[in-house]
Amino acid sequence: MLSRKRIILYACISLVPLIAALWIAGFDPNYVLGNYVTTSDAYVTGNLSQASAPASGEVTQLLTSIGDPVHPGQVLAYLAVPPQSNRELPLVPQVRSPAPGTVVHLFVLVGQMVSAGQPVATIADLRQLWVVASVDESSFAYVHLGQRADVTVTALNQTFPGRVSQLMPDLQSEGARTGVPSTGANVASGAPRASNGIPVRIDFDYGDALVYPGMSATVSIYIR
């Protein structure tokens, strides 16, 4: 007669081929067993700053391109301001970078008219990026700081290891994704969120991969 321990052991052993078969067939055992929550509503962001036009005028020259490294105060573009009634010559204001980093977006073209304060370029620190993932409200209670996560960057088709570093239920993610803040130069936070998902920050190790702010991602957070 089999003991209770042997029956449990044989039952566990018999499940191994079943789980293996499900995995081969495309079923994820971790998902079946409820070991993680996943979302495809996620994107890469970081410390983003915008270089803005100091005055209204015409863009006469762009001195940088997307992907170029820049330092604080570096001239990114020149503007031409029409002469005023009390001046004989037009002014030539300079658009300067507010922070070190890499140009990840340009909002203007040569010949375009801009107004004072209008964004000209977005600067990002590519050495420290993270992912904002929108977790469904029904699963948010299972998500905690420090939990391990897998981050798959869609454009690269690569998966990177990460961890939950912050729970941000009041973070508005759209400004952080596009690099166009509603106020100020830095877009670390914003207005109330627009969806039923709760934003969660995932710090991830992307090494030397060409990861840029705005890239879409899929995130799996291991909750067990």
Image (spheres, rainbow, N blue to C red):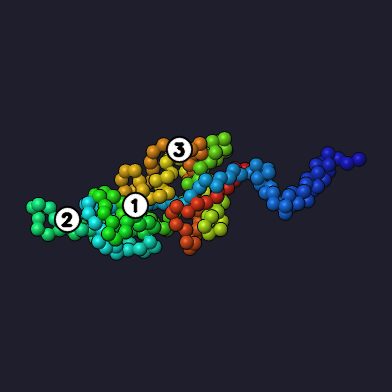
- Foreground disc of the pair 3, 1: 3
Relative placement, left or right, of 181 versus 173 is left
The residue that label 1 is drawn on is 49
Which comes before the other along the chain, label 3 or label 1? 1
Mark toward the start of the polypeptide (3 vs 2):
2
Q: Nearer the viewer, mark 3 or mark 2?
A: 2
Asked whether 193 or 28 is in front, the reply is: 193
At which x and y percent is residue 148?
56, 48
- Quadrant in which the N terminus is drawn: top right
The alpha-carbon separation of the residues under discs 1 and 2 comes to: 28 Å
Viewer-proximal residue among 98 and 165 = 98
- Judged from the image, the secondary structure of the residue bearing numbered disc 1 is strand
Q: Amino acid at mark 1?
A: Ser
Q: Is residue 217 above or below residue 183?
A: below
What's under tag 2, amino acid-wise?
A: Pro
Is residue 13 found left or right of 51 in the rendered image?
A: right
Distance from disc 3 to disc 1, alpha carbons, whole Å, reads 23 Å
Q: Which mark is residue 194?
A: 3
